Amino acid sequence: MTKTSLLARGMALAGALALFVGVASAPTAVAADSHVKIGVLTCAAGPSIGLLITSAEKIDCSFQPDATNTEHYSGRIRDFGLDVGITAGSVIIWGVFASQNDYAPGGLSGNYVGVSAEETLVLGLGANVLVGGSRESIILQPFSIQAQAGLNLAVGVSHMVLEER
């Protein structure tokens, strides 16, 4: 199989799975209706190499709450599923939703899980919807689509851990 053929099949798979991700994340979007937006989380990841079944990236994040001072977090995103390629780094921006009056400073610390899809051919896009936090009551929804540079195809389940710095 040629590289072009493999890339074409991968892109078709990414498109189909992106549609699945959109449908699969619909209940999360509805769940966000019972939550209020409390701020924006911006995370930067360095270069990464997809190892077919899994990949892991260290991230540095800043959370800008709507009502208090900026909080800083560090962590790791790990993807399980198809992940092939190399990226030069990425920035992900999420809207952060919590139950009303349910957030305390440092409350984003914890584990998050969700579905993800991304496709990169020089410059690319991806989306991740994650649920978790210190009391598993935080919803992170893509506020801005993930932007990255490189050559990569990834679809699967994401696990993210955040720790307050």
Image (cartoon, rainbow, N blue to C red):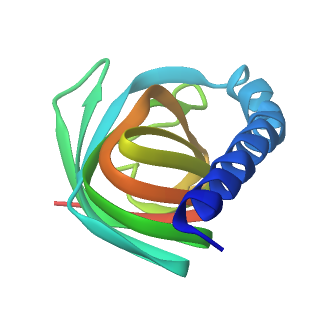
Q: Residue at x 50, y 20 (%)?
A: 37
Image point (55%, 79%), residue name: 52
At 45% from the left and 75% from the top, the residue drawn is 55
Q: Residue 14, image x and y in percent?
A: 67, 49
Residue 163 in view: no
Q: Quadrant of the C terminus?
A: bottom left
Judge by depth and name the residue closer to the eye, 128 or 33.
128
The x, y position of residue 146, in whole percent, is 41, 37
- Image quarter of residue 16: top right
Q: How many marks do you count on the picture? A: 0
Depicted 33 relative to depicted 103: above or below:
above
Q: Quadrant of residue 60?
A: bottom left
Give the image location of residue 162, x and y in percent: 36, 61
In the visual, does 111 lie left or right of 18?
Answer: left
> Residue 150 versus residue 107: which sits nearer the camera?
150
Q: Is residue 5 left or right of residue 48?
A: right
Q: Which residue corresponds to the image point at 40% horizontal and 49% vertical from the top-left?
A: 107
In front: 27, or 87? 87
Q: In the image, is 13 to the left or to the right of 150?
A: right
The relative height of residue 38 versus residue 105 in the rendered view (above or below) is above
Name the foreground residue: 130 vs 125: 125
Residue 84's spot in the image, x, y percent?
Answer: 50, 70
